[in-house]
Amino acid sequence: MLESKSLERPATKAPPAEATVEAADPKVVARDVSVFYGEKRALHSVSIDINPRSVTAFIGPSGCGKTTFLRCFNRMNDTIEGARVEGKIQLDGRDIYDASLDVVELRARVGMVFQKPNPFPKSIFENVAYGPRIHGLARTKSELEPIVVKSLQRAGLFDEVKDRLHEPGTGLSGGQQQRLCIARAIAVSPELILMDEPCSALDPISTARIEELMDQLRENFTIIIVTHSMQQAARVAQRTAFFHLGTLVEYGDTNDVFMNPESQKTRDYVTGRFG
Amino acid sequence: MTVVSNQLPPLPSNADQGAKSPYSAVHSSLSKRHASERRFKALGLAAVLIGLGFVAILFTSILSKGLPAFWQATFTLPVTIDAKALSIEPYPQQNSGQTDAEYAKEVADWQASLAGANWARLIQNALLVYLPPEAARRSRDVQRLVTSSERFQLRELVAAQPDIIGQTVTLRMLADANVDVWIKGGIDRTLSDRQLPLTPAQRQYIEILQDRGVLNQSFSTALFTNVDSRSSPASAGLAGALVGSLFMMLIVIVLSVPIGVAAAIYLEEFAPKNRFTDLIEVNINNLAAVPSIVFGLLGAAVFISWLRLPLSAPLVGGLVLTLMTLPTVIIATRATLRAIPPSIRQAAIGLGASRVQTVTHHVLPLALPGILTGAIIGVAQALGETAPLLLIGMSAFVANIPSTPLDQSTALPVQIFLWQGNELRNFFESRTSAAIIVLLALMIVLNGLAIYLRRRFERRW
């Protein structure tokens, strides 16, 4: 019974054209995910499939549960006192809430970039090297260096900081700090990167750089981004999910969600009538 | 586009403002608000000034009383180590037929024989050189000018260097406590002879010796190098108390810092937030407010009555002070940990660091300055604590320097307490203040260390 349910497609149906493109297995499969903070239910039975090597945007008004849902994918909700997650989330077919799965290993596979840039108060080099070091991907400085350089290059930051790798990461500008956080996240080669409103604290130029970066990163990584900016979702995401009051209202190809939404609520939101 | 008006609307006149302006309510309340602000500022400033005033009074009173105690009336005298006056045997020589053991025994016997010699006589002779001939008949008065412990110092000197027998050496000897106070003007000179602690002859000799340059005020290290003394108050020092306090400090640091920091880290970073941990938190806060004498009672009951640890030992004192310091360290550490931005923890956890790695790699290094400050302030507080130590027997008179934390000892604040109650008031008043200066200096050093460490480890990025 449960098995058949887990194989079911999500309630919101994807447009047929998209279905042929995403013939590949979804990277992440979530079924009936509900999150409770104590007595309060923050998320109501959300089911979703995330395509590999693409950007998926979660949009919706404040308090709609999109960040809560995002934090289920690397089990960050575990760290919140009184939070409880129900339902099933599979990463490459493996249940991430399974007791046998080590959460440390999961977080090595699922990276996260936070709303506010939060580099460690250490050098730029140490910031990027921290992940590989604790996961034992590289031990000596000579092994770490190529990883650090490559990650900074991929994050589009290397040219700006190559002469001051050993200066504090907190001395960078906000946009640079956020790219440093992205470099730090991709240094452990995660399969999935979660971005929680990564540009909300940044100016438009830094935002544009990060959006550009996401476009490049999706060649190698699967990205889920939570954003308040509908324009940003339209610019960077291939698929968009609209959340409202803890439920997934609509999920589909970004163009369809913005141009031709199925739900009246989605239409009202993307046209700016509420939210 | 045409310019309708290049003038700004006219400003409302003052008359308008009073009656019609919608801001009149704001305006009328302004003076009241400013007045209350000024009052508040004045009150704050007054509080600061009053506080500073009290500190100034404290310091001037202690410094003016205590600093003179570092300079003591001291005799600088050529003393002839005359074997005849002492009536001692010459230092034994090793005979050819004697074994080493026999010779060592003979030396030991000789050293023991020194105890019976009349060392006071030797000092008296040295003084008589400068005094009128009739002083020779007042040997008691003359001998009592020098504090009694100097005889034993002289004996030790000869026992250690027997070859000075027969020679004349220049020695510095502390004057008796009463002589010191007399010279410093601490004794009312209008009192009658019966009431004065010094005889008329002694007063006369003091004047002569001062004129001859033999008796001077000079800086004395006795306060730091000697142990407490009852028979010879002039040579009473803080050495025993200092070492006892040092042992206790070490015990407090070694126990309370790791235990307190570990407890705080567990409570703040790992423990689930529930009724039980709330209860623990409330109790820790309460413990910090428990009067220190209660910890003394606890220490007496647990460490001495039950665990049978020795009385007056720095070990027990250290354990009691550890109990007292723990809540301070825990509270300070928790406050510091709470102030570390959660984004740092999230960043580390998001990268897959385990909780322990998050704490040891990121949270602790950032919290270190605050933790050190809290710990040092807790230790400084323990250093000055007296009441609990009285209850575990550390107020006993101890006349030797403890060599282990299990030896009997006293502590700096307890020594101050003991001296404060000494019957030789006018001498020990300045001694007490001097001991307070030493204690305060130690406190300032500790607090300075806290500030230095905070600066040193604080990350400025």
Image (cartoon, helix red, strand yellow):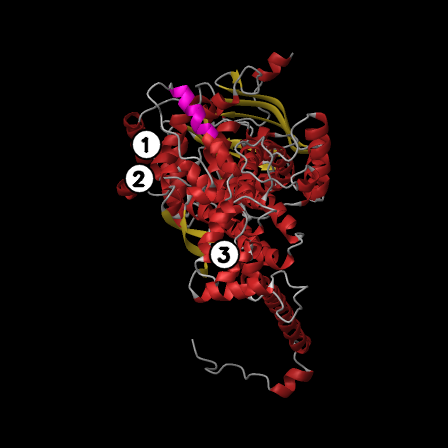
Query: Residue under mark 2: which chain is it in?
Result: A
Q: Disc 2, disc 1: CB below 8 Å?
A: yes
Circle 3 residues within 10 Å: few <14, some 14–19, many ≥20: some
Q: Quadrant of residue B324?
A: top right
Q: Nearer the viewer, residue B13 or B224?
A: B224
- Residue B70, labelled with which disc? 3
Q: Gap between marks 2 and 3, in whole Å?
A: 56 Å
Mark 1 or 3: in front is 3
Query: Residue under mark 3: which chain is it in?
Result: B
Residue at image mark 2: A165
- The magenta segment is B100-109
Q: Gap between marks 2 and 1, in whole Å?
A: 10 Å
Look at the picture and state if B43 lies above or below A184.
below
Q: Position of residue B116 (x, y in %)?
A: 53, 38
Check if mark 2 and mark 1 are on a common chain.
Answer: yes
Q: Amino acid at mark 3?
A: Phe
Check if residue B51 falls in the magenta segment. no
Residue drawn at the location 30% of the way across and 39% of the way down: A165
First in sequence, mark 2 or 1: give its number.
1
Q: Amino acid at mark 1?
A: Val
Look at the picture and state if A220 lies above or below A3.
below
Q: Amino acid at mark 2?
A: Leu
Mark 2 or 3: in front is 3
Please tell me whether mark 1 sits on a helix, a strand or a loop. Answer: helix
Residue at image mark 1: A148
Query: Which image quadrant: the N terminus of chain B?
Result: bottom left
Please tell me whether mark 2 sits on a helix, a strand or a loop. Answer: loop
